Amino acid sequence: MKLDDRLKTLRSLKKATIITDAITYIGGLQKQVKGLSEQLLEMEVLSEEEEKLGKEEHEIQQCKIEVDVKVSGIYGNKLWIQIICEKKRGGFTKLVEAISDLGFEVTDTNFTTSGGAALISFCVEVRLEAMFYCGQMGDSYFCAPMI
């Protein structure tokens, strides 16, 4: 009985109504295809970014970068600091903040990266209120305020 009712309903529809409904349905499908295509494109872009970050991490692991810090006196109260470390997002900003917190004023800087490593050079001016003694004990470096 249900099938008979549906057939009667279908026969009573006008051809124009059927075509209009089909066009509306196809339009909905096209919107859905467009939305899914955009999602796929976003996923591909994210995948490429993750792959790039993965390659950088792999390069860092292969290089086994050892942190190295060199401090040289230039003249007066100016120092030249060179740091070799892993290239990490936000690492340079944290380093500059730490140097400023120690009482040094950064007057010149250079930042170079290669294969997951970063070479950071600073020319700093030591403020009189921030005099430190720096030394090495074993494999560790330390700085202590001069009293």
Image (spheres, rainbow, N blue to C red):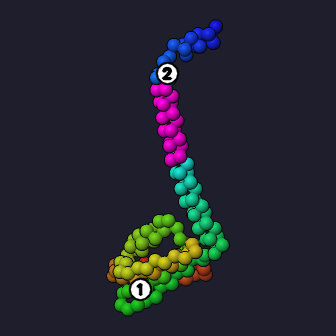
Please say whether residue 143 is visible from this viewpoint.
Answer: no
Residue 95 is inside the magenta segment:
no
Q: Which residue corresponds to mark 1?
A: 79
Q: Which residue is mark 2?
A: 15
Check the image and name the residue furthest to the left.
128
Q: Reply yes or no: does residue 25 show up in magenta.
A: yes
Q: Amino acid at mark 1?
A: Leu
Q: Which mark is residue 131?
A: none
- Residue under the image location 41 percent in, 79 percent down: 109
Please provide percent x and percent y for residue 8. 56, 11
Magenta span:
19-38
Would residue 87 appear left or right of 76 to someone viewing this image?
Answer: right
Q: Position of residue 138 (x, y in %)?
A: 61, 81
Check disc 2: other Cα within 10 Å, few if <14, some if 14-19, many if 20+: few
State how far apart marks 2 and 1 are (Cα): 87 Å
Q: Is residue 19 above or below residue 90?
A: above
Q: In the rendered image, which quarter is residue 106 located in?
A: bottom left
Q: Position of residue 42 (x, y in %)?
A: 52, 51
- Count how many numbered circles sit on residues in the image: 2
Furthest-right residue in view? Answer: 62
Element type where label 2 sits in the image = helix
Q: Quadrant of residue 147?
A: bottom left
SS assignment at label 1: strand
